[in-house]
Amino acid sequence: MSKWNLIINVGRCENCHNCVIANRDEHVGNDFPGYAVPAAAVGDNPIRILRRTQGSAPMVETTYLPVMCNHCDDAPCIRRAGDAIRKRDDGIVIIDPVKSRGRKDIVRSCPYGAIVWNEEQQVPQTWFFDAHLLDQGWQQPRCQQVCPTNVFEAVKLDDAAMEKKAEKEGLKVLKPNLATKPRIWYRGLERWETCFIGGSVSAEFAGVVDCVQGAEVTLSWGSKRLARATTNNFGDFAFDGLRGDGSTYRVEVSHANGSVWRDCVLSESIYLGELRLARPGADARGGPDA
């Protein structure tokens, strides 16, 4: 049977909050019997945009991550709530607005923090995939309808087809170690999960310090060479897709005008700053003060 899934393109989100605003526009003050009571005018929103800023000036990368109910096939909230939450045949999870009244414990059951408490109505609520609209024939939820950068893509496929699509396109889910079988998939999640090491290469020419284009930069971990890059017109380079697990990496730069190297421990993304080339025979470690 075909079931609903949502694909989120991480790199496209620009934090415009259209999805958040559309969700509030749809639900604040509006009652949808069988689906949800009116959302609170003041309170947490079931669609959130998380932000991660990496590096330091001038090499900074900001990533935005939309998060909401994952509509898990093995949902912890259902195990906690009993008949107060149901899983539809099309994969959508619905918190019953009547049976869940007063059940604040349901909020704490979600390991993704995707359930919010409606203080006005005394009920737990979440993003229910705009099922009330899909049941009327809509082909996409409102978050997809209003997004100017095409972050969201709702697809209705059987489980086998969705797994095949996920494998082919490199789609991932949040916190896979929880084994909750989410139906919200992320394209480009590595941008959120991994780190980078970057820097700028310079050299002194006739008493003038300038950036160096075309320098060869290698990244090593212990005795293993991991990657190679070439500096651009501004002397910049970057290695991404790295795990911030406290490992020590070595960056080595070589060019006709000299060489330089730097070791760094990676727990968060690092901009190494200016790496000044040293002439053969000079100390090639570090930057302009080496």
Image: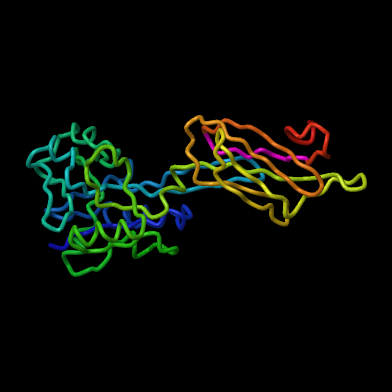
- Asked whether residue 252 is drawn in magenta, I would say no
Left-right relation of 249 to 217: left
Which one is nearer the viewer's eye here, 110 or 282? 282
Left-right relation of 191 to 256: left
The dominant secondary structure in magenta is strand
Q: Quadrant of the C terminus?
A: top right
Q: Quadrant of the N terminus?
A: bottom left
- Residue range of the region highlighted in magenta in the rendering: 268-276
The residue at the point 24 percent across, 40 percent down is: 118
Which of the 4 image quadrants contains residue 106?
A: top left
Left-right relation of 31 to 56: left
Percent position of residue 88, x then y: 12, 54
- Asked whether residue 274 is drawn in magenta, I would say yes
Which one is nearer the viewer's eye here, 174 or 154? 174
The residue at the point 50 percent across, 42 percent down is: 242
Percent position of residue 261, x then y: 70, 36
Percent position of residue 183, x then y: 24, 52
**Furthest-right residue in view?**
206
Which of the 4 image quadrants contains residue 125?
A: top left
The residue at the point 16 percent across, 49 percent down is: 94
266 to 191, vertically: above or below: above
Q: How is the image coloured?
A: rainbow
